[in-house]
Structure formats: C-alpha cells, structure tokens
Image (cartoon, helix red, strand yellow):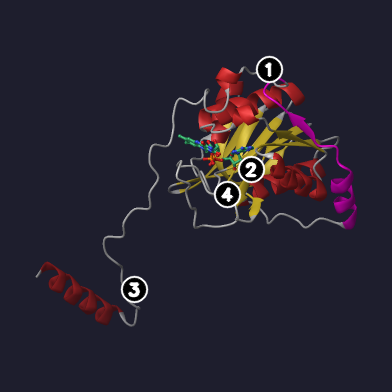
Amino acid sequence: MKIVLCIKQVPDTSDIQWTENNTIQRDGVESIINPSDCYAIETALKIKETVPNTTISVLTMGPPQAVEILKSAISVGADEAFLVSDRKFAAADTIATSRTLAAAIKTVVPDYDLIICGQFAIDGDTAQTGPSIAQNLDIPQITYVQKLVSCDEEKVVVEKEVEDGIEVLQAELPALLCVKSADELRRPLISGFENALKADIKVLSAENIGLDASEVGMKGSPTYVSKAFRPEQKCSGEIMLFEDCGKTIENLKQKISEYLK
Ligand code: FAD
C-alpha cells in the first residue's frame, strides 16, 4: 500500500513572533518537525510494519531548509521524500497550500492509498490543511485521530476524539487522516541516518506539479493576514488550592462577594 505523509517545519517555540508584514518570524528561531506530524509519521510506520509492501512518501511545502525534516522522516523509515518548493509558493494561505500539496501528491504518488497529516501546526494552527487536501482530492477524511485501530489494503479503522468521548470510525481507502496523538515517534537507528544522508530528495516546482502561478502562493490565496496581535490580558486568574470542600467553598463565596462589591 502507498502512504503519503504531509509534514511541516515549524519554529521551535510556543511564543510565535510576527514580522512587520504579518508573517511568522522564522529567522533566528530553531526549526523542528511540527509535533503532531511526528505522530503522523509514527502512525505511518506502524502501518508499514503490519501491511506488506507498504511504502511511505513524505512531502513538505516549504523553503529549502525544510529538507531537514524530510531527512528526519527518512531516518526513521520513510522511503522517499519530496520538497515542494518554489518562490511562487510564498505567502500561500491554507487554500493555496492545500491545493499545492494535493497537486504534488497527484503528481508523485497518483495511486496513493492513505494520506496522513498532523491535526494542526503549532505556528499557523488552523487545522485546515489536511481537510482541505482531502477536499481537493475528493476523498474521505477522518480528523482528530487519536489511535490507529487497524489498517489493510481496503480500509482504515481509527479512534477519533470527540467532545464527549471517542468514536471508532472506518474509512474505505483512499482516505486522509489528521492525527492528533499516537505513540511517540521512534528514534532513528544508525542505518536510518545513513539512509537520510544518501536520500535523493527531489524538489517540485509549481511547473512540475502542473499549477499555474495564479493558483499558488499569494496570487492563489483569497485570504491574507491584515493584522496579527496578542490579545491583551484583561485580568489575571487565581489558583485556589483545594484543602477541604467546605473551606474551599467558603473561600470561593468570599471572593465572589468581594468581586460583586
Ligand atoms: P495546519 O492546517 O494547522 O496543519 C495541519 C497539518 O497539515 C500539519 O500537521 C501537516 O500535516 C499539514 N501541513 C500544513 N502545512 C504543510 C506544509 N507546508 N507542508 C506539508 N504539510 C503541511 N505563511 C507564510 O509563510 N507566508 C504568508 O504570507 C502566509 N500568509 C497566510 C495568510 C493566511 C490568511 C493564512 C491563514 C495563512 C498564511 N500563511 C502564510 C500560513 C500558511 O498558509 C500556513 O503555513 C499553511 O497553509 C499551513 O497552515 P497551518 O500552519 O494552519 O497548518
């Protein structure tokens, strides 16, 4: 079976800073594989261990330095990797990003069975890219995947987190999963590092994936960030330690009546 993994390089910080053009400040910040994409990779590797003749192709859309995360994916067991990179892709919103990734998938792995994404990226954090890729390819999707139950050549069964519990869902393949959690990503073996060093990572331009400049990057993006700001903190919270039930309720009542005064 053929698995496609979409992974994203993100700044290694929860304190995202913005440039004056309202884009995310990436200069001078260490980069890592987006955390939920590590779960996506581990999920793909688990399937590869159980379904014979499985291959994993990894894609990222990003600048040249994003090749590092592709090498990391190869080092843990992915078979091939593609860097979707072109100056024309710059300033893409999520619509242009997912259109570009969908076109890249159709170009390099047209007979894919399963596409696996992370649930959300810690920088953009829209959680739109995976569902939008599925929409572009007209295939079923399951989001908020928290556990892989089983997978074979025909179907995938997963546990999906919902507000009041867990749903077990099955999708016929081809399908797309957005993975929120799974086992921690395994560490590479020495042979994995060797594979990563030897890997021939192909770069795909807009032309290579059959998209016109008007469909990608800023020109292909109907939305833009007009303003980015950190919401002002209006008041601070207070943690009340639970000592005994009666005492805590009394403390709380006192706080509320002081507030109401
Ligand atoms: P999510 O949708 O939260 O990611 C979910 C999953 O999708 C990830 O876990 C991963 O599996 C997959 N995924 C996401 N992005 C990629 C990727 N690039 N390659 C492979 N897989 C991926 N960015 C700029 O650099 N410059 C801009 O000018 C710019 N303008 C933007 C304007 C708007 C209005 C918006 C909404 C975003 C803009 N962005 C810009 C951010 C850019 O669109 C996002 O980085 C990208 O679309 C992914 O969205 P996200 O970070 O919310 O990922």
Q: Which residue is mark 2?
A: 8
Q: Between marks 2 and 1, how big is the CA–CA gap?
A: 22 Å
Q: Position of residue 218 (x, y in %)?
A: 52, 28
Q: Is mark 4 within 8 Å of ligand 1?
A: yes
217 relative to 254, above or below? above
Query: Mark 4 against mark 3, which lies toward the viewer?
Result: 4
Q: Which residue is mark 3?
A: 239
Query: Crowdedness of circle 2 by 10 Å Cα count: few (<14), some, many (20+)?
Result: many
Query: Mark 3 against mark 1, which lies toward the viewer?
Result: 1
Q: Which residue is mark 4?
A: 26
Q: Is residue 111 visible?
A: no
Q: Give the magenta range.
A: 190-207
Mark 2 or mark 3, which is nearer the start of the sequence? 2
Q: Say what amino acid the circle numbered 4 marks.
A: Arg
Q: Between marks 4 and 3, how big is the CA–CA gap?
A: 35 Å
Residue visible at 43% across and 49% down in the picture: 164
Q: Which element carries disc 2, helix, strand or loop?
A: loop
Q: Say what amino acid the circle numbered 3 marks.
A: Ile
Magenta run includes residue 31:
no
Mark 3 or mark 4, which is nearer the start of the sequence? 4
Q: Which element carries disc 3, helix, strand or loop?
A: loop
User: Number of numbered discs present?
Assistant: 4
Q: Which residue is mark 1?
A: 210
Mark 4 or mark 1, which is nearer the start of the sequence? 4
